[in-house]
Amino acid sequence: MNRTDRLYAIVEDLRAIAPRCRSARALAERFEVSSRTIERDIGALQQAGVPIYAEAGRRGGYALEKSMSLPPLNFTPAEAVAVAIALSRTDQQPFEDDARSALRKLVAAMPGQETERARQLATRVQILMDKPGTPERRYTGSIGRVIEDALLKGVVLRMRYGDANGSLTTREVEPGMFIGGRSGSWYLVAWCRLRDAVRLFRLDRIAAAELTGEPVPGRPLEDFGSDVPHMITRCPALD
């Protein structure tokens, strides 16, 4: 994790437990750096105007100003478990880190008694995995995050893509949307400049991806979605 990502993650971690404290040692263990590094990071955040304050004492540490935390959330235990189940396979979905961060915030904002009841209920729920031998088509995290950035920033993506025979081509595409397909596959729907048309790209066939920094031309979202159901049904692995 680079420093910019760590600074953001520290704020989110403190926000999730606010107004409680987190010690420098605990933060250091969480982010696999030294306590001195955490202290420098906290100092940088404070200089940037983030309302973090230190509490002295054996149980002290760093805390985020209460106004920056979520208000108490009146989820029932069943509702909390339903959210946890929905986010339980985040390693196979876009924005996986954000999903886990959101779940931590929700749990931290629940009253203590309801949180414990939700944990007890969660022990009675299990997620069935695919049968042994089922081909695994996981959401590819590192490449997926590049695509997430392209969608969020609205920039053209350059990638190396393999067809059904394994032949690689270099493409510049204008990202449109993520689509969840059959067998757990995830697809990027994009305008392919090589083909001059909308194409589906299965994420596990993208060998490399990078942002170009070029803004995506303003195409209506309907341009990307009109043929998607037909394309997935007809051909789950296009060129």
Image (cartoon, rainbow, N blue to C red):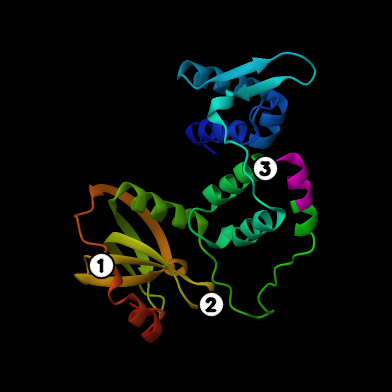
Is tag 2's residue or tag 3's residue first in the polypeptide sequence?
3
Where 39 falls versus 94 (above or below)? above
Residue 13 percent coordinates (x, y): 61, 35
Quadrant of res 87: bottom right
Please identify, in this view, whether the residue under mark 1 or under mark 3 is nearer the observer.
3
Q: Tell me the tag on residue 110.
A: 3
Residue type highlighted by circle 2: Ser
Q: Residues within 10 Å of mark 2 (few under 14, many from 20)?
A: few
Query: In the image, which residues are magenta?
Result: 110-117
- For the point 71% across and 24% down, the residue is 23
Is tag 1's residue or tag 3's residue first in the polypeptide sequence?
3
Q: Is residue 121 magenta?
A: no
Residue 105 percent coordinates (x, y): 60, 42
Q: Residues within 10 Å of mark 1 (few under 14, many from 20)?
A: few
Left or right of 223? Residue 68 is right
Is tag 2's residue or tag 1's residue first in the polypeptide sequence?
2
Residue type highlighted by circle 3: Met
- For the point 74% across and 67% down, the residue is 126
Residue picked out by circle 2: 183
Residue picked out by circle 1: 222
Left or right of 123? Residue 23 is left
Q: Secondary structure at mark 1?
A: helix
